């Protein structure tokens, strides 16, 4: 019996047209997008299906849009197959999709929460004050040294440990630029700023974390049918009582994606299904462990291919 992990994408995987093919082909997906529109009080489905891209890129829109597209794909997969995941995980925002899949979060509550989360993260740091950069080829310990040297009284720290040799840093714009210069001087030529609107997953996000904690107070957390491997600890959590605290900590803490995948593989799972827009996570999983197999479900063809293999 093969075991599976379901993984869900985060910010950056959005694109106009996402979810439309599923909605055109499956009533389950259409109903999911209608639920999203009702929960938020505007046509999120139209934004997902048609764009425009510049509106879709606004963090307060991006986060619920990716969540809705991911949950639509999840529900179609569940309706069309008997696959049951041993573990769930999501990259940053994707952890909310994983928590909906686990039963911990109600879909409508999750949509409203991530819309607020997106606004809080955008508001935490004025445009231009913070930045993020990818520094490729550097090991984690070396990168921590580079960040320490670059800080000079400002914030810069690892934000995403995505895969071997692919680490993202975040912080004050000046400190991030210094980190790029230091990395290049040390021979890491592929160091570049990322086109993001805020420095996610660093200490500058503390105001957003505080506001999110207040928003989550009113959100009910249900019993979990499968453990979610958290971004903060890279360990499976099946305790509903810990969900909110892990989500609050996640805002400022680095995403331990490489460790998450390693820990799922160590538990005996080598079949991953990326559910939602894009194929970023599938690429990262293969870089972390070449022995894994990774399918993608974001359209009708992806659903068909997976259900045929998994029968």
Image (spheres, rainbow, N blue to C red):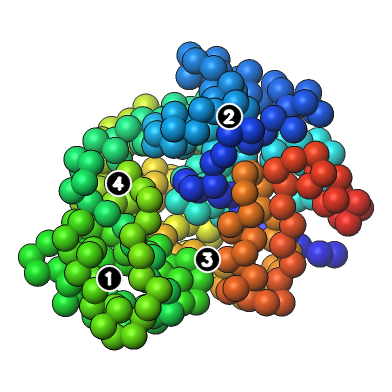
Occupied quadrant, residue 74: top right
The span from disc 4 to disc 2 (Cα, nearest Å) is 22 Å
The residue pinned by badge 1 equals 180
The residue pinned by badge 3 equals 260
The span from disc 2 to disc 1 (Cα, nearest Å) is 34 Å
Q: What residue is shown at x 54% (from left), y 28% (from top)? A: 51
| Closer to us: 231 or 293 | 293
> Measured along the vertical axis of the image, is residue 79 above or below residue 95?
above
- The local secondary structure at tag 3 comes to helix
The span from disc 1 to disc 4 (Cα, nearest Å) is 17 Å
Evaluate whether residue 103 shows in this view: no
- The local secondary structure at tag 4 comes to loop
Task: Give residue 198's mark.
Answer: 4
- Which comes sooner in the sequence, label 2 or label 1? 2
Q: Is residue 81 left or right of residue 33?
A: right
> Measured along the vertical axis of the image, is residue 81 above or below residue 120?
below
| Closer to us: 256 or 146 | 146
> Measured along the vertical axis of the image, is residue 188 above or below residue 311?
below
């Amino acid at each position: 019996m093969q075991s599976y992990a379901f993984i869900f994408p985060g910010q950056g995987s959005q694109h106009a047209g996402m979810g439309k093919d599923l909605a055109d082909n499956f009533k389950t997906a259409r109903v999911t997008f209608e639920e999203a529109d009702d929960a938020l009080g505007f046509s999120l489905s139209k934004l997902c299906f048609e764009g425009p891209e510049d509106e879709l890129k606004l963090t307060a829109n991006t986060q619920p849009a990716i969540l809705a597209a991911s949950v639509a794909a999840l529900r179609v997969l569940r309706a069309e197959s008997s696959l049951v995941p041993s573990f769930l995980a999501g990259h940053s925002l994707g952890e909310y999709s994983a928590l909906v899949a686990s039963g911990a979060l109600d879909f409508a509550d999750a949509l409203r929460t991530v819309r607020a989360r997106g606004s809080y993260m955008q508001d935490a740091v004025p445009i231009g004050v913070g930045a993020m950069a990818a520094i490729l080829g550097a090991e984690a310990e070396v990168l921590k040294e580079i960040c320490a040297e670059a800080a000079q009284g400002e914030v810069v720290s690892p934000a995403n440990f995505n895969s071997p040799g692919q680490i993202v840093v975040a912080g004050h714009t000046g400190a991030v630029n210094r980190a790029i210069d230091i990395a290049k001087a040390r021979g890491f030529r592929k160091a570049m700023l990322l086109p993001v609107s805020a420095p996610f997953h660093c200490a500058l996000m503390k105001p957003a974390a505080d506001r999110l904690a207040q928003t989550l107070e009113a959100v009910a957390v249900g019993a979990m049918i499968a453990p979610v491997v958290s971004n903060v600890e890279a360990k499976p959590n099946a305790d509903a009582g810990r969900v909110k605290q892990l989500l609050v900590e996640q805002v400022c803490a680095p995403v331990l994606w490489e460790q998450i995948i390693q820990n799922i593989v160590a538990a005996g799972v080598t079949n991953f299904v990326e559910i939602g827009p894009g194929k970023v996570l599938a690429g990262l999983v293969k870089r972390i462990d070449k022995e894994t197999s990774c399918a993608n479900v974001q359209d009708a063809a992806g659903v068909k291919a997976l259900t045929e293999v998994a029968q």
